[in-house]
């Protein structure tokens, strides 16, 4: 008789007390053990109560390939889900086999878990492994189904409400509880109570500060003092909450007829517009995507949306400043080009229209579409096409943590018709759907890969572009880490081509996420190790770094409403010299609209839950590169993770050093401030 030692790691999630019966079978290349009971239904299986067992076997199992877990309901006790972390098996000869799982078992179920070594099916895998993976994916495809969210947008998970999201994809019970109790939520409720019923216009700009007097940050305080400065207006294109829209301009667009005479007062006396265009110092922010987006109605009043164009200049002092603004795509007598030499309020309101357009495009296109919806596509496709034992699954699954839960909540309340967005956004939920359709039509693989995007937009040499600098450092670190993982598991390009699970995953993302738009350049298959490295780097970067860049600064830059009005109540001025302070007050959002927007940005900008909970280490913020769930069991990938973490730590040190002594810091892409996934 041989004895196998089994240790079950019962991970410490709240709500993890198990009252069902748990059984196990070890499956080897030679044979399998009999079904052995690990846990009695009447004896609680407590969180973090790791158990060790001895399993007898009449025969040598050989290499242990699988463990089969049974969870069976008790006749007299209510069903309880069980979160299984991992199972470790020690053979009679002392060989250790690790079976990472990190998933919930709900109801009466049977689950087979593959041994932890990453395996691809392009070689000659054991038939037992092939069968187990096929069965696993068949089960997951039943629970994770696609549906159309809105016409022309990436498809999403087919779930109607948060109560029906698969347990593995939900926030933990602790996180849900803390969401209800955390101090930021309570502050927001108090804030909303005082202002949400007031539909009056603001009577002056000073009063706006009262609404966020208790919610300020260092940056938001600076914004409230700098918002009218042209240098700060330009700074936000580089290091604000939407640092991805500015492009080099080498030729003035035909529909934006800016002349030398118009901008001569803004340029230094020793240069001219033609010279600056040739020298690469002129840039453009074009909001054409907003053209024909139907405006929202707020407080019974139809709002207005413009599709402005803004010309910017890099000064000899290396500042980026606006030098011309047109509040529409069609030039003409009723669409004047506003200039810094115009009256104070003409120029201020023109910039406010640009900032309003930037907010709408940022939230609907670069935030919702580019990060949240793509991360959901990656998550659903990963669940449906990659088994737990696949190395790509092991690599990216913790970069998809909580994303489904976040997005389902958003579709249910934030961006649903009649939801929060309809209370403060100039385009509302209907307009967001239009932006998603138009945005996906414009999305390219180039725009998703940071080095290519920087080159395409021609912004390689702009000084003090910290989003670019920090993002490129982290992109390179991710790429090196991913490349090493890819080369460890795929010995050559042929192995990539012949991995059926990998190719099915990429094809499904192309089909369900990018709707098979060939002009996008998004691959529908991968042919080389380099192709796979680039693709996986893009996935990880999108779910972590890109999301941090467009999410974390929302409250900092949007809480002072005049800097980024969420909606505009009057049409853009059709004549110069007509704008007064009263015009500005009549155009910007009303009091309750301002309050709803501020409260929303406060909740979306930072995840207070992971920072205040001290119940378990896994509830803390999952920083980029930190993987509390050990999906990789081999020594080589474990060392690669450590190397990756050290490189991120060095990047963090350099970013902190650069920000020393600066009043206006850029810390959103400090790896210590980046979450692994779209988790808020």
Image (cartoon, rainbow, N blue to C red):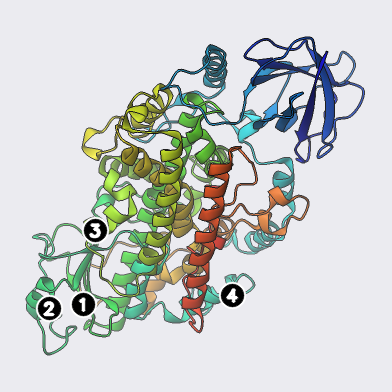
Is residue 300 among what the camera can see?
A: yes
The residue that appears at 49% across and 23% down in the rendered structure is: 145
The N terminus appears in which quarter of the rendering?
top right
Measured from the top left, where is residue 644 in percent x and y? 51, 54
User: In whole angstroms, how far apart are the C-alphas of marks 4 and 2?
Assistant: 39 Å
The picture quadrant where one finds residue 139 is top right
Q: Dots 3 and 2: beta carbons under 8 Å?
A: no
Above or below 309: residue 11: above
Mark 1 vs mark 4: in front? 1
The residue tagged 2 is 262
Q: Which mark is residue 339?
A: 1
User: In whole angstroms, how far apart are the C-alphas of marks 3 and 4?
Assistant: 43 Å
The residue tagged 4 is 210
The residue that appears at 59% across and 71% down in the rendered structure is: 212
Mark 1 vs mark 3: in front? 3
Circle 4 SS class = helix
The residue that appears at 53% across and 78% down in the rendered structure is: 221
Horizontal side, residue 40 vs residue 524: left or right: right
Q: 10 Å neighbourhood of mark 4: few (<14), some, or many (≥20)?
A: few
Q: Earlier in the sequence, mark 1 or mark 2?
A: 2
Q: Which mark is residue 455?
A: 3
User: In whole angstroms, how far apart are the C-alphas of marks 1 and 3?
Assistant: 29 Å
Circle 3 SS class = helix
Of 144 and 95, nearer the camera is 95
Q: Earlier in the sequence, mark 1 or mark 3?
A: 1
User: In whole angstroms, how far apart are the C-alphas of marks 1 and 4?
Assistant: 32 Å
The picture quadrant where one finds residue 62 is top right
Of 407 and 73, nearer the camera is 73
Q: Dots 1 and 2: beta carbons under 8 Å?
A: yes
Measured from the top left, where is residue 133 in percent x and y? 54, 19
């Amino acid at each position: 008789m041989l004895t196998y030692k089994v240790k079950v790691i019962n991970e410490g999630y709240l709500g993890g007390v198990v009252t069902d019966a748990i059984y196990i079978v070890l499956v080897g290349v030679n044979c399998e053990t009999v079904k052995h009971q690990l846990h009695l239904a009447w004896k609680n299986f407590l969180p973090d109560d790791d158990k060790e067992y001895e399993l007898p076997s009449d025969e040598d199992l050989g290499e242990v390939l699988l463990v089969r877990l049974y969870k069976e309901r008790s006749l007299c006790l209510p069903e309880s889900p069980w979160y299984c972390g991992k199972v470790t098996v020690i053979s009679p000869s002392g060989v250790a086999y690790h079976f990472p799982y990190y998933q919930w078992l709900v109801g009466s179920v049977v689950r087979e878990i593959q041994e932890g070594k990453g395996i691809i099916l392009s070689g000659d895998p054991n038939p037992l492994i092939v069968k187990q993976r096929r069965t696993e994916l068949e089960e997951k495809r039943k629970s994770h189904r696609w549906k159309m969210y809105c016409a022309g947008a990436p498809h999403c998970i087919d779930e109607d409400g948060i109560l029906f999201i698969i347990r593995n994809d939900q926030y933990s019970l602790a996180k849900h509880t803390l969401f209800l109790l955390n101090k930021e939520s309570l502050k927001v409720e108090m804030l909303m109570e005082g202002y949400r019923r007031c539909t009056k216009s603001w009577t002056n700009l000073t009063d706006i500060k009262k609404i966020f007097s208790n919610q300020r940050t260092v940056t938001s305080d600076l914004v409230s003092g700098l918002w009218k400065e042209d240098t700060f207006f330009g700074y936000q294109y580089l290091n604000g909450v939407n640092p991805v829209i500015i492009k080099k301009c080498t030729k003035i667009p035909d529909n934006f007829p800016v002349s030398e005479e118009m901008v001569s007062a803004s340029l230094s006396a020793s240069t001219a517009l033609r010279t600056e265009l040739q020298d690469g110092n002129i840039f453009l922010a074009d909001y054409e995507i907003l053209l024909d987006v139907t405006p929202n109605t707020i407080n019974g009043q139809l709002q207005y949306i413009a599709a402005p164009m803004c010309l910017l200049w890099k000064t000899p002092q290396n500042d980026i400043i606006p030098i011309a603004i047109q509040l529409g795509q069609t030039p003409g007598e009723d669409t004047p080009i506003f200039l810094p030499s115009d009256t104070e309020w003409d120029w201020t309101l023109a910039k406010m229209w640009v900032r309003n357009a930037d907010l709408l495009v940022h939230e609907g296109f670069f935030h919702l579409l580019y990060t949240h919806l793509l991360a959901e596509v990656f998550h659903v496709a990963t669940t449906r096409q990659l088994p737990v034992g696949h190395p790509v699954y092991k690599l990216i699954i913790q970069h998809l943590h909580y994303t489904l839960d976040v997005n389902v909540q958003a579709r249910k309340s934030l961006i649903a018709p009649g939801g929060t967005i309809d209370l403060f956004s100039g385009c509302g939920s209907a307009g967001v759907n239009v932006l998603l359709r138009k945005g996906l039509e414009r999305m390219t693989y180039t725009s998703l890969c940071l080095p290519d995007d920087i080159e395409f937009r021609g912004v390689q040499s702009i000084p003090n572009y910290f989003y670019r600098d920090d993002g490129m450092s982290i992109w390179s670190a991710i790429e090196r880490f991913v490349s090493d993982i890819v080369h460890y598991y795929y010995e050559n390009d042929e192995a990539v081509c012949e991995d059926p699970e990998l190719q099915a995953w990429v094809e499904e993302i192309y089909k369900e996420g990018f709707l098979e738009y060939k002009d996008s350049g998004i691959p529908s298959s991968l042919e080389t190790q380099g192709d796979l490295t680039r693709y996986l780097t893009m996935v990880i970067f999108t779910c972590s770094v890109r999301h941090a860049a467009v999410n974390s600064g929302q409250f900092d830059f949007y809480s002072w409403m005049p800097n980024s009005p969420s909606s505009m109540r009057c049409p853009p001025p059709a004549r110069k010299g007509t704008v007064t302070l009263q015009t500005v007050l009549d155009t910007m959002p009303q009091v309750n609209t301002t309050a709803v927007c501020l409260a929303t940005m406060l909740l979306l900008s930072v995840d207070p839950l992971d920072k205040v909970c001290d119940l378990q280490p896994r509830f803390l913020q999952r920083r980029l590169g930190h993987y509390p769930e050990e999906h990789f069991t081999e020594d080589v990938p474990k060392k690669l993770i450590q190397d990756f973490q050290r490189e991120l730590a060095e990047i963090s040190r350099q970013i902190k050093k650069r920000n020393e002594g600066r009043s206006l810091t850029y810390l959103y892409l400090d790896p210590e401030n980046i979450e692994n996934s779209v988790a808020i």
